[in-house]
Image (cartoon, rainbow, N blue to C red):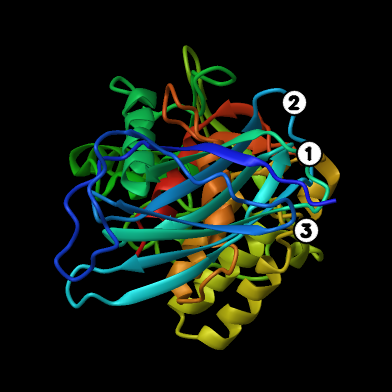
Amino acid sequence: MNRQFALIALGLIITIPVFQSPMFSKQFKPLPGLHVVKSLPPNMVAGSTYGWEVSFVNPKSEEGLMNVTLEVTEKKTVVGFGEFHVEGTLESYDNPPREHHTLPLTFMETSGGIFQSQALISERFNLIKLEISSVPNLMPGEYTFTLTITVNYISDIIKSAVEFLNNMYNEKVKLCAESPKTAPKTYWLVSDNLWAFKALEKHDSKLSKTIKSKLIELAKAYNLPRDAQGLPISYKHEAVIGDTVPTPFNVTVQYTLYSNDYTIKTEIANGTTIMEDWQEYADLLLYAALSKHWEGKDNEAAALFNKAKEMWDGTGINDKATKADGYYATYKLGLLLYTSKVLGIKLDFETQLIATIWNTQDKTSGGIITSYKTDGTPLGDTNTETTSIIIIALTQK
């Protein structure tokens, strides 16, 4: 029996401004507002495929995380899981010289009739092509399709994160505190403030220099191991700022340098025991990879990086620490992304990684939450260490 259903209306919500179409293409048309409803002929037969093209303009012409949500609803019944299937492509056009890029969009059905896809975009003019198909036994009804497109710009993620570090900075101590809730009066030289000064270099140079000067002062005062700039080191974390580190790594020891109305701490991998299993930890592999790169040994760097990359399980970095803890560490995403950019090795899951970072950013404070569960739910407090390495990674070109 041939069943038909009517497409009564197709709603489009674009949460970014759209402008006049470029001279070189007639596909990009100005939209009259942020919400556009288009009536379609009710001739889509159950079991068939419908094509839909949506164009929009990226007004900032800068990199952002595009989130696409297609929602299928019916007036009288609930749309069941698996009743529709969605495939798509994203066609993007640069500003001059008008290069054309095509990227497949993978849509996942998160609940009945709701499909989501993500992609990184940076070009100004974008065209989404969708193919929406229904199962042969779809019940007749008045179906509405609503498409929502949002773009979360990388620059905005960074800006909010920088504001978080500014709020974590204590003028009296001249350092950033560890975290706003769990340790608001604890100040780590390494890794927190070593990374914070690096993170702020291109976004708040004055504050960056202040923190750097305080680090150098305290490293000398407490006779800590230092690099050529006089900065305190841990024999691990300084690889992020361009220093080399020794391998294999020794066990890390935490030191309390000052404790009164506030606490100053640091950590140094100077224990008497060598970590025989250090290559089972993604962060240590990445510190070593960066170090080899700074030494000019890129083949060794790539081999170490690839070992860390292989620990990505589709949700996060599943290394020995994750297996023991039962949750993922967000800072390792930033460290992996940063190392990939430094080495020039593209991550094929970069979009998903950045989407996970965005999901762990506290939308009020701008800080990055330290951990997340296997289902992606953020876990724990925001902190300086995680937020700093994320800024460093997203800033790196």
Q: Nearer the viewer, residue 314 or 236?
A: 314
> Closest to the observer: 179 or 66?
66
Check disc 3: other Cα within 10 Å, few if <14, some if 14-19, many if 20+.
Answer: few
Crowd rating for badge 2 (residues with CA inside 10 Å; few <14, some 14–19, many 20+): few
Type of amino acid under label 1: Met
**Marks 2 and 1 close (CB-CB < 8 Å):** yes
- Front position among marks 2 and 1: 1
Q: Which residue is mark 1?
A: 139
Question: Callout 2, which amino acid?
Answer: Thr
Nearer the observer, disc 1 or disc 3? Answer: 1
Q: Quadrant of residue 101?
A: bottom left
- Asked whether the residues under the numbered discs 2 and 3 touch, taking CB atoms below 8 Å apart as contact, a structural biologist would say no
Name the spot of residue 156 as percent of width and height, x first. Answer: 33, 40
Q: Earlier in the sequence, mark 2 or mark 3?
A: 2
Question: What mark, if any, has residue 77 been given in the picture?
Answer: 2
Q: Secondary structure at mark 3?
A: loop
In this view of the protein, can residue 236 be seen by the observer? Answer: no
